[in-house]
Image (cartoon, rainbow, N blue to C red):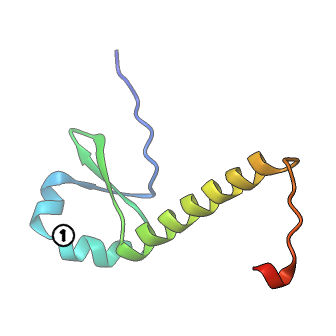
Amino acid sequence: MATTHSIYASTTVSMTDLRRNPSAILQDAGDSPVAVLNHNRPAAYLLSARAYEALLERLEDAELSNIVKQRQGGKRVKVALEDL
């Protein structure tokens, strides 16, 4: 039975091609992810440093948003501006 695997990138590259010329693959990809395939299955995703940093920022924003939602409706403490 054949199993399909979702690939979350519009560009794919084989492990062999990645070993041959990683610089060209990074340059061609720009800030888009590249799925690295091993035996036609995704083994890894390659991201530029800028794309990875942007992803981390989005994750941090989502985490902070969840904290805000959890704390909504909680106990409030009045603080004078001068006390800050």
Q: Position of residue 63 (x, y in %)?
A: 61, 54
Q: Position of residue 78 (x, y in %)?
A: 89, 65
Residue located farthest toward the top when viewing the structure as drawn: 1
- Viewer-proximal residue among 31 and 28: 31
- Viewer-proximal residue among 31 and 68: 68
Which quarter of the image is occupied by the C terminus?
Answer: bottom right
Q: Position of residue 67 (x, y in %)?
A: 69, 52
Q: Is residue 42 above or below residue 54?
A: above
Binning the other alpha carbons within 10 Å of mark 1 as few (below 14), some (14 to 19) or many (20 upward) gives few
> In the image, is 62 to the left or to the right of 24?
right
> In the image, is 17 to the left or to the right of 25?
left
The residue lying at 29 percent from left, 49 percent from top is: 44
Three-letter code for the amino acid on which mark 1 is drawn: Pro
Q: Secondary structure at mark 1?
A: helix
The residue lying at 86 percent from left, 60 percent from top is: 77
Query: Is residue 30 at all visible to an observer of this figure?
Result: no
Residue located farthest toward the bottom when viewing the structure as drawn: 82
Which quarter of the image is occupied by the N terminus?
Answer: top left
Query: Is residue 66 at all visible to an observer of this figure?
Result: yes
Which residue matches tag 1? 22
The residue lying at 27 percent from left, 40 percent from top is: 40
> In the image, is 42 to the left or to the right of 17?
right
Q: Is residue 51 above or below residue 35?
A: below
Q: Quadrant of residue 60?
A: bottom right
The residue lying at 75 percent from left, 55 percent from top is: 68
> In the image, is 76 to the left or to the right of 60?
right
